[in-house]
Structures are given as structure tokens and as C-alpha cells.
Amino acid sequence: MKPSPPNSSQRSQAIRLMLLVWWLVLGAIYPADGASANLKFQIVPQFNGASLAFDSLTNATTAGQRISVTRLDFLLSNIALHRPDGTWVAQTNWFAYVSAREGKTRFELNNIPTGNYDRVRFLIGLTPEINHKDAAEFPATHPLNPDVNGLHWGWTGGYVFLALEGNWQQPDGKQSGYSYHLATDRQLMTVELPVLLNLSSNQEVRLALNVDQIFARPARFVLNDATTSTHSRTNDAIANQLRAGIEHAFALAQVQPAAVASLPSTATNHLDVASNATPYRLTISHFFPRPALPTDNPLTEQGVELGRQLFFNPQLSINHSQSCAACHKPTAAFTDSRSVSTGAEGQSGTRNAMPLFNLAWKSSYFWDGRAATLREQVLLPIQNPIEMHTSLTNVVARLNLSTNYPALFAHAFSSPEITPDRIARALEQFLLTQVSHNSKFDRVLNGQARFSNDEQRGFELFHTEYDPHREQFGADCFHCHGGPLFQSQSFANNGLDSDFTDAGRSVVTGQEGDRGKFAVPSLRNVEVTAPYMHDGRFKTLDEAVEHYCTGTKRSATLDPNLAKHPDGGVPLSDADKRALIAFLKTLTDERFHPQTNTPALAELN
């Protein structure tokens, strides 16, 4: 009689035995002996066993509901690897930021002792002593810098540990939104997974994040109007259930040798500074996160002054009629008073001129984010056919013919030579110094002023979400305009249209999920930056506020933090609208106000 073929369980046991033998043999061949290796990790988001399709309303939960995921961001800390002898190799001063939709899914541990490991453990979130540290202490590129992760609550303190947002389809077919933010020390999550890891050389571990399990464990999660948001309030049942689901949503996907890193590019940005240039002292609020200033273009008094003169110089346009300041007026927080600006030759643009302050805290520029750096951005309007419409060659030639510019370039840079790169560097330096941090709001934070009753009510409305099921009746502004900068690095569809004549961010990314999304601007100085929105459609602050109360339109890419609200928006009384506007006016920095604008920004004669 022929023996029966092994069943699937027997085959799995045999494979595990072979892997264990191979692991032990390699461990004998490659002992630790003080050696170390690097360990790379990659988070692989999945839904029902397949790669997670972001922005797509095609993911079916165990409750039979169709949902999309538009944001999946979280912080990791305190990673540790377990040895077979029972000891843990931990890196307690280690942090990582993951933004799955944006492709930021990789992180690395360096100098791990070689040897065998059988478990990996990490926290999603931060221990209390880290969670309540002053976030302004973290360096510009640190994972816990609020400008890097967008997960800090601002002056109120503490981080969001995990943000999961998206849309869901109601039984009647209408699309609504959900927004789950797990935070507070009670919501710290621990993930521990088995792993067969022989770290005799650099390795890569791929961890699956099964988002479907977040909505399935420990019990089936059903979305409805009462379960679309949480902010980890004490004893919040929704937050507690999601926390348990997240802890069980990770699984080991693969362990493999780490790919050999490609050699770094030989092209480097050079330092170009005059030897006797005076460093510029940039002053910022102690509430602001540390900015990522360009290391190859340090601010100097001479570079900033050169940039200022270039900013106000009409020679940068085709017919000597228009300077940068023509569309970015210092007396209006560097915005235009028109819905769209008019170019040097009379052409109308298609988008509103954006404010030019606190640019040191931005990671992309223009309404659609098509410029990755400020140095790249400043040269594009000069060459744009419907803006200043000239060539950089012409600009350089004109400046060379002037009596003062060669000397100004020599004072700022290592030689008198005028180049497009140096023009961009000077403009970059000038714009980076336009910092707005001295408003009544800032003085209130510093204990130097007090809000009026209306301003205090507006502050509370701004920072309270609208969630009637939990007796929260705020204006819910802080989701998109939170923190001391009152802006975010993200792009959002804020419900201006159901059909888009301007596709916005999707023109740059090519992603359908970015249609109708635009950069989220700062609300600082909003009192003086009218008209509002990317196309300047709202002439007054009252109109802009009314849009979020009654005018929000639904579409496939509407931001979940707006889509979770009733049709039209957040219903506010007339008194609350007035209070909200009163608070917004406390964000005006007198330096950028037309009645108190400093002479230092006045146009050159």
C-alpha cells in the first residue's frame, strides 16, 4: 500500500522544522562576537490579503461595508528584538514616523548585535515622558518634529499616536467620512510578533499591516453616524476597540537579505557664502517646531538684503513693469487683493496668490505642491508666460548692467558673478526671514494679553470637533489648521465643488485620489489675506466661514474630516460664527497689517 501524501498541516510542520535547522546552523556559522549588522523594516499595508488601494471605496469590512483609506499615519518607538536565551536587545531612544499613503513606510535599526532573534516588539505611540516633552526641542528632521509628522496637538501638548481616516458608503449609497485619532497615554499600543531572524548580515523585515483586522478584532466594527470619530477620550469605547484591533493587525510578511544601498550621488549642493558675510539672526516663537533651513544656503544679512531688493525689482519681468511684490504685497501678508493676479502683460492667472510667510515650515510650494523647494519655486513665476514672462538669461544680463547689483552679489556670495542659482538663493533667504509669530494670539499664549469673551468662545469652537453623539458642538477647524502654525503639510479637498474645473494636486501626482485637493494654507493673518481659497472665490472672511457651515459640497475626494459632518457643513449659530471670526482676527501679526506694516518691508524707491 502506498503511503498517503502529507497533508497541509504536516507540510507546514516540515517547513518550519527545516527553517529552524537552517537558522540554528547559520547561527553557529556566524556567531555574534561583538559584530553588528543593520536591520531594515518595511510596513506593507494590506486589506483582506491584498495590497491596500488607498482612496478607493472598494475595501469590504467584515460588516459588509465598503470603505476607503485616505490617511494612515503613526509613530513607532521603543523597538526591541528578543534572543532565544530570553534577553531583549532594545533601542529605547528610537522613533519612526510612518505615512503609508505617502509611501513613507521604511525605517532602519543600525548596529544591532549579530546573532539569532525570535521576536520583535515595538510601541505604536510614545511613552508618557516622551509624549509630554516640548515638541519644539526635536531637530528639524527628527521623526517627532511636528512639522515632519503632523501628529502633534500643538500648544495643548501630546501626540496623536495613530491617525486612520477615510470614507465609507452608507446604505443609501451616500459617501460619508470617518476620522480615528488614537492618542493620550491610555492608548499606547504594543505590538509583539514572532520572527525567525539570523542577523549575521544586513537584513530586511517586511511587516504586513492588515487594515481589515482593525475593523474586525476583537469584534466586528460597524460604521454609522455615531461611530465615525474618536479622539481617545477617557473610556471611549470606539478608541478602545480600535486600539485592540491595531495591536493585532500586524503580521510578519517576509525576512530577506537587505538590498545593497546605491552609492550616493556625487552631485552636492555647494556652500556659496561671502567670507565676510554676517550671519542673520532669525527669531522664531518658542512654540514653533524647529524649521529645516537649507544647510547649503545659510541666512546672512547681505543675502537677505540682496533678496529683498530682488523681490521688489521690476527688472525681473519682461517689460520692467512687475516685481514679485506686485502680486505678493507685504502689507497684505504677501498676498494679492485680487481673486487671481494679473501678469506683466495683462494676462489673468487661474489661482489666488498665496501668502509668503512662515515658508521655512513648508515642504512643498504652490497650491498644487509642484515645487519641492523654495529655491525652485522663486524662479518659476519669473519664467511663467502669464506672470512675469521673461528668461533667466535676460534677468542676469539686466542685473549685470546695473551699477549696484554686482557689488551686492559680491557681498552675499563668494564672487560678484550673477547667476540664476544665486538669484534663487537670495530670494530664498529673504522669504525665509518673513516669520509671523507676533499676534494677539501669541501674546495670549505668553500671558501678555487676554482674549475677549467672543475671542475665547471662538478659540473653543476652533479647537472642538463637531460630534453631537458625544455632545461636542465645535467648528472642528483644528483638524486641518492645527498647531501654532495653523497649517499642515497636507493637501485637502475642502468641499468647494462637486465637479472640478481645476484638478489641483492630481495634476502633479497623477493620482485620482488627489483630484480637487489643494495645499492647506496657514490661517495666520487670515484677516488681511482676502480673497480666499485657491481661486479667490470668497471675498470676505464671513463668506469663507459660511462655506464650512452651509456650502460644503460632497465628492469622492472630500476630506474625511469634512465628509463626516452633515450635508453642507457644521451648523453654527450666527453668534458662534461671529465669535469664530473674532478669534481668527487674533491671528493677525501687526508686522503684516496694512495699517502697522514695518518700514523694513516697504518697497524700494
Image: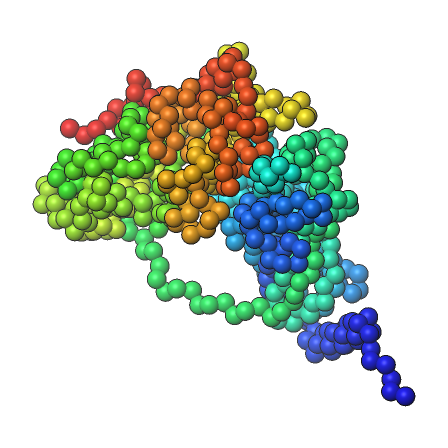
The spot of residue 16 in percent (x, y) is 77, 72
Residue at the image position 37 percent from the left and 34 percent from the top: 534
Which quadrant of the structure image shows residue 527? top left
Q: Horizontal placement of 84 versus 443: left or right?
A: right
Residue at the image position 31 percent from the left and 42 percent from the top: 428
Closer-to-camera residue (196/599):
196
Closer-to-camera residue (412/452):
452
Say which quadrant the N terminus sits in.
Answer: bottom right
Task: Inspect this view and state whether residue 335 appears.
Answer: yes
Q: Residue furthest front?
A: 172
Q: Would you place residue 205 above or below residue 182 in this image? A: below
The spot of residue 415 in percent (x, y) is 20, 51
Task: Inspect this view and state whether residue 434 appears.
Answer: no
Count of labels in the image: 0
Closer-to-camera residue (161/230):
230
Q: Horizontal placement of 349 versus 180: left or right?
A: left
Say which quadrant the C terminus sits in.
Answer: top left
Q: Would you place residue 94 above or below residue 453 in this image? A: below
Residue at the image position 75 percent from the left and 44 percent from the top: 220
Q: Would you place residue 490 above or below residue 205 in this image? A: above
Residue at the image position 42 percent from the left and 19 percent from the top: 542
The spot of residue 604 in percent (x, y) is 18, 30
Q: Residue furthest right?
A: 1
The spot of residue 53 in percent (x, y) is 56, 53
Q: Would you place residue 470 above or below residue 110 in this image? A: above
